[in-house]
Amino acid sequence: MDRRVDAALAVLVVALGVFLVVASFGIRPGSVPDPFGSGGLPRVAGVMFIVGGAVLAGRRAVELARGHGRLAPSEGKDDEPGFPASGWRAIHIWLALVAAGIVLLPLGYILTVLGVTFWTLRIMRFGSIRSALLLASIFSISSWALFELALGVRLPRGVLAPLIDLIL
Amino acid sequence: MDVFGPFLSGLAMLVDPWLLLLVAAGTIWGCVAGALPGLSASVAIAVVLPLTFVLGPIESVGILVGILIGTGYGNSIPAILVGVPGTPSAFLTAVEGFALHKAGKSGFALGSAYFATVSGQWLSILLFTIMVVPLSQLGYVFLSPEIFALHVLGLTAVVSLTGKNIVKGLIAVLFGLSISFIGRDPVNFVPRFDFGIPEFRVGIEPIVFVIGILAVSEIIRSLRQRYQWDSLSTEFSAKFPPVRSLGRLLPATGLGTLIGSFIGAIPGIGSTPAAAIAYQQARLVSRHPEEFGNGSPEGIAANEAAQSSSNAGELVPTLAFGIPGSAAMVLLLGAFSIHGLLPGPLLITRNPEMLHAAIAGLLIATITLAVVGWPLCRLLLRVALLDRSVVLILAAVLTLVGAYMLNRSIVDVFVMLAAALIGYFMIRYGFSTAAAALGMVLGVGLESNLRQGLLLMDGSFVQFLSRPITAGVLLLSLALLVYGAFSTWRLAKRDRRESQPAPSHVE
């Protein structure tokens, strides 16, 4: 685990705490007065964020100042040994899902699911382009049939709306 | 107090063929998910959870319980046949079972796992009913201060008993709590932190946040890696062992069931420690302790009975107090909220059919495992050797669509994805996503009970905190925090010691 990244996350926690404290003073009081009020718990949470973040950031700052080096024992979940790992692959997959969210309504369920499944399978280097396309197509159409036809859940139709209306 | 009435009511639900079919399907899906290393019970539930919106609450609870039970069995198949546990709680099954498989006793290993899971499950259903019914009656004596204290206990238990760093655990809880501030103040209905977004005025949908931070984040983290199982064979020969040979497993199975049921009922502990403790105890009482570590069927039986019965154990605090016993239970509470049911100590007293549905789900799942569990072994091995990436990608896409389907809101999709990204970094850097999810789910209840409790006590903190049950539960929470702080300090000391170079010997 990179100490500098961990310290940066701790600083982010402090910033979140400062935001909560400042924003809580802008919350208007309600009609039922209670000892905490509408902004009370956010304020308490903000202070705890500031203290907790400062403790974590301080710990890493001391370690870096003492020359302990960039790497620290991991406190999170490690990758499984023996298999290649890439953080950029994970972020790339996330971006593909975000893109799917953006185009879900205009393009519709079938094309969006087909596209994002194909794209993410290719990111993971699954099979050939043809096999990825085939799997993505089968998945998008069968899942659409399961939700729309079997379970009666109305899914976004997008550009295929005229065709789907014709079928149904 | 009628303890067995709910059990009989749950039994009566078995005449519903639709419920039988749904729970059986959920159980088999759970077995498949459990068999796939990297696909946890949380992910298996998260994929199906949005679909439960089209079902009734009884069917929803039943199917989710079925998935839970199924994963507890499915994880033993790759553990025994490949040496890789489907989920961490099957680790000791992998140690003992794989050794037996290599010695040509695959049938005995698989049969032991099957026997212990199914027989342990029957007993755990009874224990669950015996524990949950009296505890749920306590809901009648709980006022807002006591409910607030229970929420605090649930949060501190998760923080103190999991994770390596208690400060990070507390920050994770606070993060989840902060997300619950978005929307309207639960006492005065004053708008807070909506950033001008109309959809945020009613708050963030808890279930999409929980699915994002618990399940999708884990999927994205798993997709950092590419896995290959090409070199492993799917061929094995296994006959079901003679029934009389399973008799020696009864003590280990009984011990595992008792330990799993009681330890599983403690919020935050989960099935993995329960299984480890049961394994250790079984070794102490075994007539063949030398077999442990080298292929002990009693080790398998204790581990499997404990992890399967801990599922029923986790349901106890979840249904009795509204305090989730594990990450999967957080999702189950989310399912209640989808159907407009408020999680809390009065959940099953106001909605007893939820308890009956849970019992029915446990019964049907156990019957399903009893019927198909053994024949499924071969199929589950093939499943375990599937390209994990494909399953994870399909699961991620399904959860994305499921998030949209809940309220037909694209904002929910982006909330889920934002939670997933945050959860990904939380997992990587040691902040508990389960604690954050729990903070979000319990946040509104915690704040409303705190403030309404203070109003009840005329604004007096002393009166609030000096109520006997409130004080007792809060002291227990404090003790857990102290224990967690001590564990953090001890781990940090060990890490510092291990990172120092060994002293050199000068002759």
Image (cartoon, coloured by chain):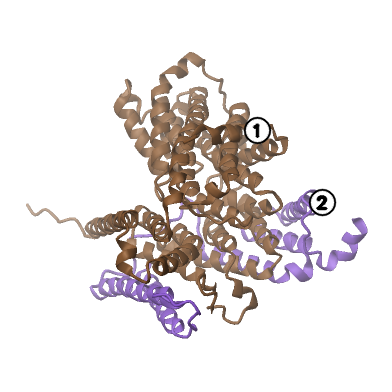
Chain colours: A purple, B brown
Q: Mark 2 lies on which chain?
A: A
Q: Residue B14 carries which label?
A: 1
B133 w.r.t. B407: above or below: above
Quadrant of residue A53 in the image?
A: bottom left
**Percent position of residue B396, x then y:** 62, 57
Q: Which residue sits at x=50%, y=51%?
A: B346
In the image, residue A163 lies at what x, y percent? 90, 62
Residue closer to the observer: B70 or B454: B454
Q: In this view, does B291 lie to the left or right of A98?
A: left
Q: Which of marks 2 and 1 is in front?
A: 1
Q: Which amino acid does label 2 sit on?
A: Leu
Q: What residue sits 68% from the left and 69% below the top?
A: B410
Query: Circle 2 sits on which residue?
Result: A149
Q: Is residue A72 visible?
A: no
Circle 1 SS class: helix
Q: Distance between the residues labelled 2 and 1?
A: 27 Å
Q: Is mark 2 on a helix, strand or loop?
A: helix
Give the number of callouts: 2
User: Quick one: B31 or B264, which is closer to the camera?
Assistant: B264
In the displayed structure, does residue B472 sit left or right of residue B362? left
Residue visible at 54% across and 53% down? B333
B285 is higher (above) or lower (below) than B403 = above
Position of residue B503 in the picture relative to residue B52 (left or right)? left
Amino acid type, mark 1: Leu
